[in-house]
Amino acid sequence: MKAVIYARYSSDSQRDESIDGQIRECTEYAQKENITILGTYIDRALSARTADRPDFQRMIADSEKGMFDAVLVWKLDRFSRDRYDSAHYKHILKKNGVRVISAKEAISDGPEGIILESMLEGMNEYYSAELAVKIRRGQKENALKCKANGGGKPLGYLVDPETHKYIIDPITAPIVREVFERYANGEMIQDIADSLNEKGIKTAYGTVIRISTISVMLRNRKYIGEYKYGDIIIPDGVPAIVDKDLFERVQRRMERNRRSPARMKATEPYLLSSKIFCGYCGSPMLGECGTTRKGVVHHYYKCYSAKRRQGCTHRKGLKKDTIEKAVVLYTVNRVLQTDVINRIADSILVLQGQADTTTPALKAQLKECEKGITNLVNAIQAGILTQSTKERLEQLEEDREKLKTSILQAQLKRPQFSKEEIVSWIERFKYGNIDDPDYRSEVIDTFVNSVYVYDDKVILTYNYKDGSDTISKEAVDRAFGSDMEKLAPPKQKSVLARGRIFVLYSSFFTLQ
């Protein structure tokens, strides 16, 4: 019998030693029962009350490949603490010819085993639900007493080991006050973070200080003494590090900055960054923004060399949304054609074979081994039977089983995709929403290699051999508005581009 081990622990308070123990006892059970272990699936700090566990789901999916006959767990509660999930996923495994085996719970295959297994699963779910109730009750009691309830503690505080309440850390609390005062006095968050990092100051987790670290710190009401846990809020429940007047001044400045154009510039994703270049000097085109008198913010790509006045005269910017949508629409139309998709899929299949050198070598050894077995069997049938031929045949049969196991293990570690699966994955890009930034980002990241911009054309290259095309500026203008500045609805026009005629619609380029 061939099996895989599934191991899991529930919370961050547990450690990898728990996983090691589970795997060790499962391995000992497998050796005793003559079960071959092909591999392991491990989920860390994930509850069994949900089936949304990455390796658990990967194991269920791999069971369809018919590589293993059983899933070995330390106890059934490692598999699931929800009896409905347990029944559902065991049914899927059973349909795929896979059974779940508990290394520590002796469950027979007979009718009594069914009753015992259902009782154990019911008890596991009861234990989990009861434990959750007790934990929530204990946490609520702790919160009402303003005690620490686990999780990370903010910079500036310690937890008293006897009372379990927050106390001020005399070493890091002055740093918190300094951050609040510097920000209230007009310093930028990035400058504050940089200066703290230069001094070697770390967060409570021992990591470098980032903009997000400072932002979260400046909004944390615990620093003015407010204790909060869930719906429980207790003013003056913890010792304050900053006074309320300073805290409110900081909040007012953060609110002003939240509404400022600089914020929009910082958070606007420039999807073509690192892929868009000036066609004249080759410099990257960088994202920037400008604000009209009416407060409307426009985002552009502009040549870095021209912007810095380093010799390039191509000073005109491209409107961000216009060029990104044009690139995505043109790419979808150009790349997602049946012949191109098939070429890409064939290339990926070749790369899969090139990347995996282990499996072909093992299969070649298996072929030689089976050839040797066939020759020996033929010799025995011809009357040549000696102690040496018998021992050699037994050795070859043992080698064959080992090679089969090794091939299955290699395939589990490196899943192989069929051409149909690859084609299906690529074709899903055909029907995305062009106004969805996530869709545009995925198309650009997957297919676009580079974009070179000239005054009269844009040259696109794609992530496959000989994948390139030119789109004229007139085509973009007609589709998105004059001079790439407005998104006016275009009229239907025919445009010749590199020998191919494209009809431009307001939302798609259609290949004729």
Image (cartoon, rainbow, N blue to C red):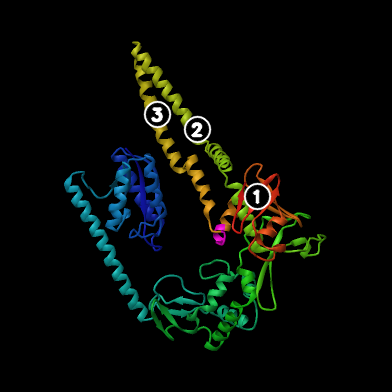
Seen in the picture, residue 330 relative to 32 is either above or below; the reply is below
Give x and y (percent) for residue 8: 37, 55
Q: Does the magenta stretch include residue 400?
A: no
Q: In which quarter of the image is the N terminus?
A: top left
Which numbered disc, 1 or 2, marks the residue that appears first in the sequence? Answer: 2
Local packing at callout 3 (Cα closer than 10 Å; few below 14, some 14-19, many 20+) is some
Q: Distance between the residues labelled 2 and 3?
A: 15 Å
What's the residue type where badge 1 is placed?
Answer: Phe
Residue depth check, mark 1 versus mark 2: number of the one nearer the observer: 1
Which numbered disc, 2 or 3, marks the residue that appears first in the sequence? Answer: 2
Q: How far apart are marks 1 and 2 (CA)?
A: 45 Å
Which numbered disc, 3 or 1, marks the residue that appears first in the sequence? Answer: 3
Local packing at callout 1 (Cα closer than 10 Å; few below 14, some 14-19, many 20+) is many
Looking at the image, residue 13 sits to the left or right of residue 443; the answer is left
- Specify the label residue 400 is tagged with: 3
Foreground pick, 438 / 480: 480
Seen in the picture, residue 29 relative to 437 is either above or below; the reply is above
- Disc tally is 3
